Image: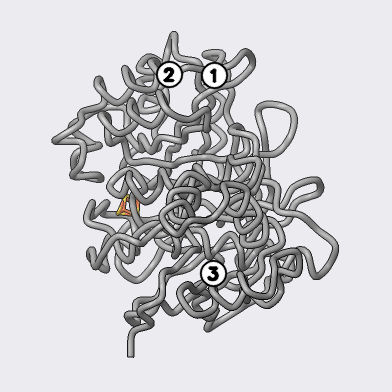
Amino acid sequence: MKDARTDLKGMSLGELEAFFRTRGKERYRARQVSRWIYQKVAEEFSAMTDLSRGFREELVATCRISSPAAEIMELSRDGTEKFLFRLEDGEAVESVLIPEENRRTLCVSTQAGCALSCVFCATGASGFRRNMTSAEIIHQVCFAARRLAERGERLTNVVFMGMGEPLENVPEVSRAIDILLSPHGFRLAGKRVTVSTAGIVPAMRDLADRYPVSFAVSLNAASDEVRSRLMPVDRKYPLREVVAAMRGIPLRSGRKVTAEYVLLSGVNDSPADARSLAHLLSGTRVKVNLISFNPHPHGNFRSPSPASLDRFRDVLMSAGIQTITRERRGADIRAACGQLTGASKDQRGRGKTGSRGREEPKNP
Ligand code: SF4
C-alpha cells in the first residue's frame, strides 16, 4: 500500500520552510531537517538527534524520507560503481559513480526511459516511461554520498547525464539543482553540477538564466542533414539555434560550454566533418568531448578507428578548439546507461586530452 505520509526528500529549502510554516513550526526547523537529509544523508527521523523527541515523533507520524533500494551494485576494476534503483512503481533507473584522483562524480538519471530516440542510444531505444521526481533524482545523490561517507570520501561533482533528457523534466531537475547548490543541501558549486542536454533550446536558456551550472550539449554532427538522422530533436531545434543558445549561456571567466560529439564510423567521423564542426563552433567558448561510440544491441553503428579519432581531434585542435577524448571507465561493468555507454568506453583504452587535466564523463 502506498505510504500517504509526505516525502521530505526532494524538497528544496524553500519548500521545506513552506511545509513547516503551514504546520506552525519555526523557520529554522527547515534548515535543520534539510541538513539532516542532504548533508548527513539521514533516512530516519530518529537519527535527527538535535530535534526534540516530540518533533521527531510528529515527523515520523506525518512525513517520510523515501529511499528506494539499490537493486544491483557493480564495481569495476577501475573503481567505477553502477547502481540500479528500483523506484516505488517498479521502474528501474541507473546511476554511475566515477572516482578520479581528486574528484568523485555521480552521473544521475532524470527520466525512466527517454522520448528523444537518438538512434545511437540504448536508453532512447527503450522508449519513454515517465519523468522522475526530484526525490528520486536526489535519492541517487544521497545514496552515493552515504556510500562515499562510509569510506571517508565526499561527492564532488554531479552530472545530469544518466537516463533521460534532463531538460524535458525541468521542474523536477530544477528542484534537484536547488538542493545540490543550497548551503543547507549538498553545498556544491555551480561549476560542479553539469546539465547535459540534447539541445532543448528554450529550456537551456531558462536554466542558464536561473542557475550557474555547467552545460554539456550533445551535437554529434556538424550539419542538420546528419544530425537530424541521428537525433530527431534536431528537426525541432536545429544546430544553428542550439549553437546560438550555447553562445548565450552566461559564463564566468575561464569557463566553457562542453560540446559532446559521439564518433560513429563512416557517419560523422571524417576530417571534413571535423572541419565543419570547427567552423560551426568558431567564436564559441566551447570545449569538445569526443566520445568513441560503444556498440550496443540496439544500434547498427560501428566505433571509429583510433586513427580517425586522432585525425578528428587534431583537426579541431589545430582550429584552436580545446578537445578531449576520455579515459575508459567502468568498461567491465558496462558502467553506463544509454548515454554513458558511449562516454565510458574510449576504444583506445586511454584518456587523451588536448588540454591539461581530465574531464568528467559527459553525455553523448
Ligand atoms: S542520448 Fe540522451 S536525449 Fe538521446 S535518447 Fe539517449 S537519453 Fe535521450
Q: Which residue is mark 2?
A: 278
251, 26: nearer the viewer:
26
Instruction: Indicate which disc, 1 or 2, sits on the residue closer to the N terminus.
Output: 2
Q: Which residue is mark 3?
A: 334
Q: Is residue 348 above or below residue 252?
A: below
Q: Is residue 340 visible?
A: no
Q: Which residue is mark 1?
A: 321
Amino acid type at image mark 2: Ala
Tell me which residue sits at (39%, 33%) in the image: 270
In the rendered structure, the answer to whether residue 95 lies left or right of residue 231 reads: right
Q: Is mark 1 within 8 Å of ligand 1?
A: no
Question: Which label sits on residue 150?
Answer: none
Please tell me whether mark 3 sits on a helix, a strand or a loop. loop
Quarter where residue 190 is shown: top right
In the image, residue 152 lies at what x, y percent? 85, 62
45, 199: nearer the viewer:
45
Do residues under tags 1 and 2 come within 8 Å of each other at their CB atoms? yes
